[in-house]
């Protein structure tokens, strides 16, 4: 990750996972399809099924990690908001959707109360829209 994080560079890309491993799984899947078509047998069908399972594991491993991360962010943001939001907004902390909380985590402490109010009042729920509204980006370098 770069020293300074912002909207343009905040996504996490792990070359060995997103590039190399995925590429290997896709090549294996394509090869297995080729084998089933050109030399069908019980062994080639099993190899194809395993290649499908590998791809499913690849995707679900990422989805499961991101789901756990989102749950942690939800908890973290609710605690943070309990400390930073003005008294009139604190009862509304549970009104924030997971998408809103995840996007708001990048807002600095100074701007969070105002931005949180705007997100609730305007019913903004799209992560990218909220992230683009952040002026003082708070880096999150410990992401899955």
Image (cartoon, grey):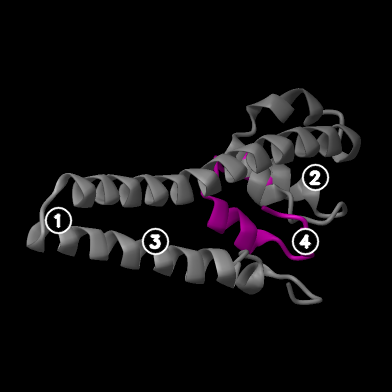
**Residue at 61% across / 63% down in the picture?**
132
Find residue 36 and name its label: 1
The CA span between labels 3 and 1 is 16 Å
Q: Can you give x and y, in whole percent of width and height, for residue 79 in the image?
A: 84, 33
The extreme right residue here reads 83
Q: Which residue is denoted by mark 4 in the rendering?
A: 141
Up/down of 93 relative to 126, above or below: above
The extreme top residue here reads 91
Q: Can you give x and y, in whole percent of width and height, for residue 126 in the image?
A: 51, 49
Q: Secondary structure at mark 2?
A: helix
For marks 4 and 2 on the same chain, the one whose residue lies earlier in the sequence: 2
**What is the quadrant of residue 28 in the picture?**
bottom left
Q: Which residue is denoted by mark 2 in the rendering?
A: 113
Labels 2, 3: front one: 3
Q: Secondary structure at mark 1?
A: helix
For marks 3 and 1 on the same chain, the one whose residue lies earlier in the sequence: 3
The CA span between labels 4 and 2 is 23 Å
Q: Secondary structure at mark 3?
A: helix
Query: Where are the magenta residues, as a range?
Result: 118-144
**Residue at 76% across / 33% down in the picture?**
75
Membership of 124 in magenta stretch: yes
Mark 1 burial class by Cα count in 10 Å: few <14, some 14-19, many 20+? some
- Return the residue nearer the eye: 8 or 143: 143
9 with respect to 77 (left or right): left
- Return the residue nearer the eye: 62 or 76: 62
Labels 4, 1: front one: 1
Q: Which residue is denoted by mark 3 in the rendering?
A: 25
Q: Can you give x and y, in whole percent of width and height, for residue 88 in the image?
A: 81, 28
């Amino acid at each position: 990750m770069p020293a300074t994080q912002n909207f343009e560079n905040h996504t996490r890309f792990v070359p060995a996972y997103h590039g190399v491993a995925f590429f290997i799984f896709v090549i294996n899947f394509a090869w297995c399809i080729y084998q089933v078509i050109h030399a069908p047998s019980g062994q080639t069908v099993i190899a194809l099924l395993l290649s499908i399972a590998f791809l499913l594991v690849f995707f679900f491993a990422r989805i499961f990690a991101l789901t756990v991360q989102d749950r942690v962010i939800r908890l973290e943001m609710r605690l943070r908001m309990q400390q930073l939001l003005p008294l009139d907004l604190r009862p509304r902390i549970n009104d924030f959707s997971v998408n809103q909380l995840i996007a708001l985590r990048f807002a600095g402490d100074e701007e969070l109360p105002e931005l949180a109010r705007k997100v609730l009042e305007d019913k903004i729920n799209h992560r990218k829209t909220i992230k683009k509204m952040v002026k003082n980006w708070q880096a999150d370098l410990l992401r899955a």
